[in-house]
Amino acid sequence: MTDTQGKGVFLKDDKGRWTVINIWAQWCGPCREEIPELNALASDGKIRILGYDFDDSQGKELIKKARNMGIRFPVVTQSPMVLLETRDPQVLPATMIVNPKGKLIEVLYGPQTKESLEDSVRVLMNKVDENG
C-alpha cells in the first residue's frame, strides 16, 4: 500500500507497534467526531494509526477530503481489506486492530476514543502474551 504522500506502507511494523486502521467517510458524522481522538493517539506514537476513505477517493480528491476531515495521520490509497483478508465494513466508522506481524486481530464498529483504543490494544497485547 502507499499513502497520499506516495510512501510505502506495510501492515507489518518493524518497530513492533500495533496498527489501528480507521475506515472513514467524509459524509459520516461519527467518523468526523472521532478524528481528533485518532489524531491524539497518532501523536503519541505508541500505536501506529492509518486511515482509509471508505469511498476509495484518490489523488487530490483524497488529500482534500483528509484535510477537510482534519486528519493528521497517514491515509492509505488502497483498500487494506484485501491484504487483511476481510470484507468491507457495513458500518462506519470501522476500526481494525492489526498486530505487529500484520495480522488483523479485531474490528471495532462505531466511534472510538483515544482511551478506548488504547484499552483495546492493551487487552489484545495481553492476550497475545498469555497465549504466545
Image (cartoon, rainbow, N blue to C red):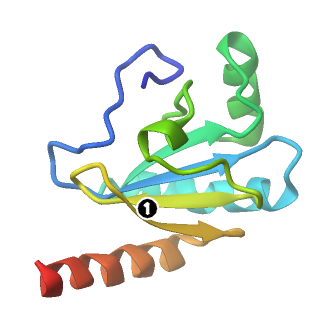
Query: In the depicted view, which residue is nearer to us: 49 or 79?
Result: 79
When the figure is inspected, residue 45 is found, relative to residue 108, above or below; the finding is: above
* Callout 1 crowding tier (Cα within 10 Å): few <14, some 14–19, many ≥20: many
In the shown orientation, is residue 28 left or right of residue 56? right
Query: In the depicted view, which residue is nearer to us: 25 or 131?
Result: 131
Q: Which residue lies furthest to the bottom in this view?
A: 130
Quadrant where the C terminus lies?
bottom left
Query: In the depicted view, which residue is nearer to us: 70 or 51?
Result: 51
Count of marks placed on residues: 1
Is residue 58 visible to us here? Answer: yes
Q: Quadrant of residue 14?
A: top left
Give residue 91's position: percent from left, percent from top: 77, 61
When the figure is inspected, residue 110 is found, relative to residue 2, above or below; the finding is: below
Which residue lies at the image location 48% right of the left edge and 16% below the top edge?
A: 5
Give residue 49's position: percent from left, percent from top: 44, 49
In the shown orientation, is residue 81 left or right of residue 19? right
Give residue 21's position: percent from left, percent from top: 50, 50
Which residue lies at the image location 43% right of the left edge and 47% below the top edge?
A: 84
Quadrant where the N terminus lies?
top left
Q: Mark 1 points at which residue?
A: 97
Which residue lies at the image location 58% right of the left edge and 51% below the top edge?
A: 22
**Amino acid on which disc 1 is placed:** Ile
Q: In which quarter of the image is residue 104?
A: bottom left
Give residue 36's position: percent from left, percent from top: 64, 57
Which residue lies at the image location 43% right of the left edge and 78% below the top edge?
A: 120
When the figure is inspected, residue 60 is found, relative to residue 78, above or below; the finding is: above
In the shown orientation, is residue 87 left or right of residue 43? right
What SS does tag 1 mark?
A: strand
When the figure is inspected, residue 76 is found, relative to residue 98, above or below; the finding is: above
Is residue 73 visible to us here? Answer: no
